[in-house]
Image: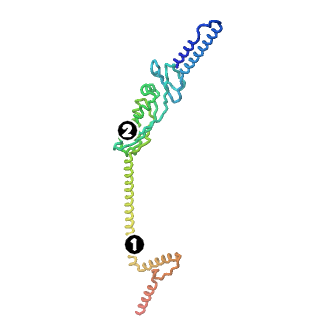
Amino acid sequence: MADKIKEAMKRISQNIPKGGMPSGGGGGGAAAAAGKAVTALASAGALGFAAYSSVYNVDGGHRAVVFNRLTGMKPTVYGEGLNFVVPWFERPYVYDIRTRPCNLQTLTGSKDLQMVTIGVRVLHRPSPKQLVWIYQHLGMNYDERILPSLMNECAKAIVAKYNANELLTKREVVSADIRRELVKRASSFNVQLEDVAITHLSFSPEYARAVEAKQVAQQDAERAKYIVIGAQQEKQTIITRARGEAQSATLIGQSVKKNPGFMSLRRIDAARDIADIVSSSGNKVYLNADSLLLNLLGDADDKFEKSVRKNSRW
């Protein structure tokens, strides 16, 4: 740009006549004054352009390095605010040193030879004090040059140490191992990693179906186990009930032997229960004594027969 300005000023000076007009000194003085005005205007424009080109601004969260055409990269890293350079001889390059994300998804194999698709997100930023080295070796797009290859290599190396089921049950451990390896590798390129996280983890459709079938089989086995336990408990309940009924029958038999009136008492209790059930129903039912298990007439006949035998003896 400065070369173009110099060339324009040269053309303007060549078009301005050096001598006066052949006749009349006033015309020659006017031409000379016009030439001086144009020269002054061009000089002012060049000076303004030079002043504009000699300053640059570094925004917040950014740093700058300067390349000199004569000496190469300057060793100083320039901070935020207004900075100065020599026009044409020096050129600034501004880096964003704020934390930025980088996402990568890769297909790799686990320890048990299962294909795994893993997605990793990395929060990174360049080391502010090493921006000169980063520009000399990696350029402005340093993250696109190194992070994808590093993330891909580290993720595959770590996943290969675990089985497919361990990738699910030990996800935090896997993430920590990937972070440790990435931080170690990225530090050699003067790139700082703030956080590493596993954002996606999936297996092949065949393995997913096998895992689902295994889970279904385990659920069926658990269900069958509970069914067996329930049957055993029911069997134990039946045995306990049978033992109770047997003991009850034994006690009833002993009571009948010791006290013959026990059966009459049980008949009265049964008749009372039958009468309560019949009376609470909506239908009107008439039952005889035999249905109520009282057998009142039979008892009366027995008493009458006993009394007759007793009197006949006398």
User: Image height check: is 8 above or below 295?
Assistant: above
Q: Which residue is mark 1?
A: 248
The image quadrant where one finds the C terminus is: bottom left
Q: What is the crowding at mark 1: few (fewer than 14 residues within 10 Å), some, or many (at least 20)?
A: few
Q: Report x, y in % for residue 2.
A: 52, 18
Rendered location of residue 226, percent (x, y): 39, 59
Task: Please state if 39 lies on the left or on the right of 173 as rendered.
Answer: right
> Hey, what amino acid is under mark 2?
Lys
Foreground residue, 93 or 305? Answer: 93
Disc 2 residue crowd, few under 14, some 14–19, many 20+, Cα 10 Å = some
Q: How many marks?
A: 2
Distance, label 2 to label 1, CA atoms, is 74 Å
SS assignment at label 2:
helix
Q: Which mark is residue 156?
A: 2
Q: Position of residue 257 (x, y in %)?
A: 38, 78
Helix, strand or loop at label 1? It is helix
Q: Is residue 216 above or below residue 10?
A: below
Q: Would residue 231 appear left or right of 6 to someone viewing this image?
A: left
Determine the residue positioned at 53% across, 28% down: 59
Q: Nearer the viewer, mark 2 or mark 1?
A: 2
The residue type indicated by label 1 comes to Ser
- Along the viewing direction, whichever of 242 and 309 lies nearer the viewer: 242
Q: Nearer the viewer, residue 265 or 278?
A: 278
Report the residue at 62% width, 11% height from top. 31
